[in-house]
Image (tube, rainbow, N blue to C red):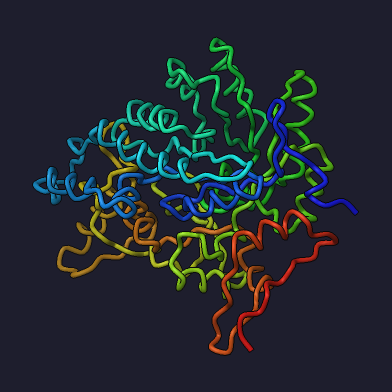
Amino acid sequence: MKRVDDFRLRFGNEEYVPIMIGGMGVDISTSELALEAARLGGIGHISDAMVEDVSDRKFDTSFVKDKTKLYKHNINNMDKSIVQFDLERLAEAQRLHIGATMKAKQGPGLIFVNCMEKLTMNGPRETLRTRLNAALDAGIDGITLSAGLHFGSFALMADHPRFREAKLGIIVSSVRALQIFLRKNAKLNRLPDFVIVEGPLAGGHLGFGLEDWKDYDLMTITKELLAYFKQENLDIPLIAAGGIFTGSDAVSFLEAGAAGVQVATRFTVTNECGLPEKVKQEYFKASEEDVIVNGVSPTGYPMRMLKNTPAIGSGIRPGCESYGYLLDANGNCAYINSYNREVEAHPNAKNVVVMDKTCLCTHMRNFNCWTCGHYTYKLKDTSFKKPDGDYQMLTAEHVFKDYQFSTDNQIAMPEKEFE
């Protein structure tokens, strides 16, 4: 019976353990988590979601404080169009976060950064250009383009000296999405170095409809993409992602022709993950009924999360002057519209309830939006329950090696830390 370790992910002449840890935003996929993946010979992701806030926490910078002070006068204004990011400061935060991570890298693996197109930041094109080029400046091994179709993203990097050196890839959920991406970028004569196919059981934002995600299957989409690659004679590594919970799950995709797998859910309950421990315990204790898909994200994409996440129904004032990562090109955000609607409907209420959307920036920043993968309810089967009712935390190395070496759908339990 084969193990994941019997396969290798190849980029040119280089080979890696075919395990990629997904990019969970706002420093949930921490540098420490990505560094462990690289040390063990795989690929780790950090995220540039809300990178100025991440920089403030890690490097004692004051990007958020300074932006808040600059736009404080606009806090009670419904019009957020003036709330712009300083591109030089955005680039500085990106280079700090990525540069420090790359400087600390050891081992034979790689570190990529996950860049979401849906972080429109009241200037979609220029803020994305800044983030992508600053990541290349800082020496990142690769960039994964996520949460969007990214028709113009390669062009935003085309003049950078590392445009053809760094590994550049995209997340898609269908053959059609990839076809459009390739067609839009054909004139650059620069194919993606990898493609991640993300199925409907993934965590966070989904590339499917709110009602029809259950109609799709990762293995089916993976085989469709592999057939398309063969038909078009495309030699691009395909990485399968979404709902791969055991090493045996991973092997089934590798045997089908995928070059690697991207996994994340099982790493949410490791010491290296950036979630607070109390939130990790919520993940451990979740039942299958606790995992839901809803439409509360202002991006318009469906989102999978725990149903008891504090972000659902929270009517906090929009924090755009401090954050504003989801403001569109006109300074609009779906949450602002929902919030203002409820304030108008309940003018005397001390606190309003907003059920249809959530202030994703503030809640993700405070770890109050508990996004998760479909199989989060299985996490309790991967560790030991302690006498106080909490579960023992895992290490990223333990989970990584369990994926790498396990067989027969078995899950290796950690060494017990209590009696």
Tell me where residue 300 appears, x and y as whole percent.
Answer: 44, 44
In-front residue for pair 297/411: 411
The quarter holding residue 183 reads top right
Q: Residue at x 69, y 42 (%)?
A: 240
Give the answer, above or below, for where 152 lies relative to 127: above
Q: Position of residue 87 (x, y in %)?
A: 27, 31
**Side of 391 relative to 361 (left or right):** right
* Residue 200 horizontal/vertical position (percent): 63, 48
The single residue placed furthest to the right in the displayed view is: 1
Q: Viewed as shown, does residue 182 lie left or right of 12?
A: left
In x, y percent, where is residue 156? 42, 21
Among the 4 quarters of the image, the one containing residue 374: bottom right
Above or below for 308 versus 294: below
Which residue is drawn at the image coordinates 74% and 53% (left, top)? Answer: 404
Left or right placement of residue 64 versus residue 144 in this view: left
Which residue sits at x=72%, y=47%? Answer: 217
* Quadrant placement of the N terminus: bottom right
Query: Quadrant of the image for the C terminus?
Result: bottom right
